[in-house]
Image (cartoon, rainbow, N blue to C red):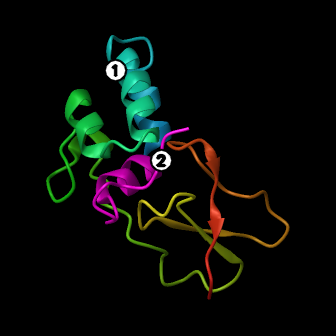
């Protein structure tokens, strides 16, 4: 199995944004030729390619640029300040800074892009 760590050892802000908006992206390309681009690109991202390459193939601007195709979504750097309860989970491969809160007793969050359960973050 290929490594899921980025070659540079740095977090990928495009991966965080793709993960946060994956459902919207998948719905937007469903039934179009871009659905195949998404599937091929996901395989490459799972093998360690930067998510920006996939975004470019889908015609979506990289991090730091306008993302109107995603309804103005910004790179997700962490949690909203209002979430103070529940466990925090992050990227299963440590490749992005996205974090989500799991409510007590809730299901373990999954990374839709990498296809695995997110890892528990230390407080």
Q: Which residue is mark 2?
A: 3
Can you tell which of label 1 and label 2 is closer to the viewer?
Answer: 2
At which x and y percent is residue 4? Answer: 47, 49
Magenta range: 1-20
Label 2 residue SS: loop
- Residue in the picture at 32% in, 58% down: 12
- Place residue 121 in its image quadrant: bottom right
List the single residue furthest toward the right. Answer: 105
Q: CA distance from mark 1 to mark 2?
A: 21 Å
Q: Check the picture and name the quadrant holding the C terminus.
A: bottom right
Vertical arrangement, residue 75 with respect to residue 33, above or below: below
Q: Which residue is mark 1?
A: 37
Which class describes the residues within 10 Å of circle 2: few (<14), some (14-19), or many (20+)? few
> Is residue 106 one of those drawn in magenta?
no
Horizontal relation, residue 52 to residue 17: left or right: left
Horizontal relation, residue 119 to residue 29: left or right: right
- Residue in the picture at 47% in, 47% down: 3
At which x and y percent is residue 97? Answer: 42, 68
Which class describes the residues within 10 Å of circle 1: few (<14), some (14-19), or many (20+)? some
Label 1 residue SS: helix
At which x and y percent is residue 66? Answer: 16, 51
> Is residue 15 one of those drawn in magenta?
yes
Q: Which mark is residue 98?
A: none
Horizontal relation, residue 48 to residue 123: left or right: left
Q: Check the picture and name the quadrant holding the N terminus.
A: top right
- Residue in the picture at 24% in, 38% down: 53
Vertical arrangement, residue 31 with respect to residue 115, above or below: above
Vertical arrangement, residue 78 with respect to residue 62, above or below: below
At which x and y percent is residue 63? Answer: 21, 55
- Place residue 122 in its image quadrant: bottom right
Task: Give the mark nearest the N terminus, 1 or 2.
Answer: 2
């Amino acid at each position: 199995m290929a490594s899921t760590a980025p070659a540079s050892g740095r977090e990928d802000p495009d991966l965080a944004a793709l993960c946060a908006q994956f459902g919207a992206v998948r719905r937007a390309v469903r039934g179009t030729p871009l659905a195949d681009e998404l599937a091929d690109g996901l395989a490459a991202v799972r093998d360690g390619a930067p998510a920006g390459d996939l975004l470019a193939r889908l015609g979506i601007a990289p991090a730091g640029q306008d993302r109107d195709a995603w309804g103005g979504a910004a790179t997700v750097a962490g949690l909203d300040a209002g979430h103070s309860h529940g466990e925090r989970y992050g990227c299963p491969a440590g490749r992005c800074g996205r974090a989500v809160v799991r409510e007590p007793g809730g299901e373990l969050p999954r990374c839709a892009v990498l296809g695995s359960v997110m890892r528990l973050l230390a407080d």
